[in-house]
Image (spheres, rainbow, N blue to C red):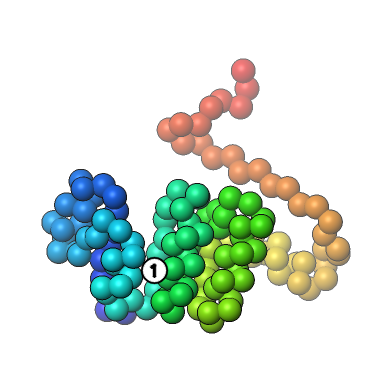
Amino acid sequence: MSDMVQVKGVADKSARNRNLASQYKIKAYEDYRDLINKEELDCLIISLPNFLKKECVEYAAEKGIDVFLDKPMARNYAEAKEIAHQVGRRGTRLMVGSNYRYHPSIRKIKDLWEEGRIGDVHLATSELIMNGPFSHPLTP
């Protein structure tokens, strides 16, 4: 692991997962609040079920900790706005992980739009088709 990154701990309700972390000499907590309160953290990676994200992000922001949040950011638009408001008023940073945000093809589309070469975008849809172990054939 990079000298610039240090895993201070993990939080998980699963005893099995906490034991696994301990095998790698990583501190493991049952509750994310204990991790936040007991460790000196620069940032927190949150990967939780969607209904739990808002509470955890707001708690981290309240403690002045920046957050990397897996997608989706929230269950709905109102909840996303509330998360953004709480993070913004506390002055912490939030980044939502998107799988293809920095993919070259996505960056190219964004660059073309920013250069004004695409024009006004009113609606955009995309479809990602990948062959993998759980993919379904495209033809019946």
- Residue at screen point 53% across, 55% down: 71
Give the side of residue 42 with respect to residue 113, left or right: left
Residue 36 image position (x, y, % from top left): 33, 70
Identity, as a three-letter code, of the amino acid under mark 1:
Leu
Mark 1, other Cα within 10 Å: few <14 / some 14–19 / many ≥20: many
Q: Quadrant of the C terminus?
A: top right
Residue 54 image position (x, y, % from top left): 51, 59
Q: Which residue is mark 1?
A: 44
- Residue at screen point 13% across, 56% down: 23
The image quarter containing residue 137 is top right
Secondary structure type for disc 1: strand
Residue 62 image position (x, y, % from top left): 46, 75
- Residue at screen point 76% across, 72% down: 114
The image quarter containing residue 110 is bottom right
- Residue at screen point 50% across, 31% down: 135
Q: Quadrant of the N terminus?
A: bottom left
Seen from the viewer's position, the closer of residues 15 and 25 is 15
Task: Tell me if residue 103 can be seen.
Answer: no
Give the side of residue 123 with respect to residue 75, left or right: right
When the figure is inspected, residue 65 is found, relative to residue 27, above or below; the finding is below
Task: Tell me if residue 30 can be seen.
Answer: yes
Number of numbered tags placed on the structure image:
1
Give the side of residue 133 with respect to residue 119, left or right: left
Q: Residue furthest bottom?
A: 91
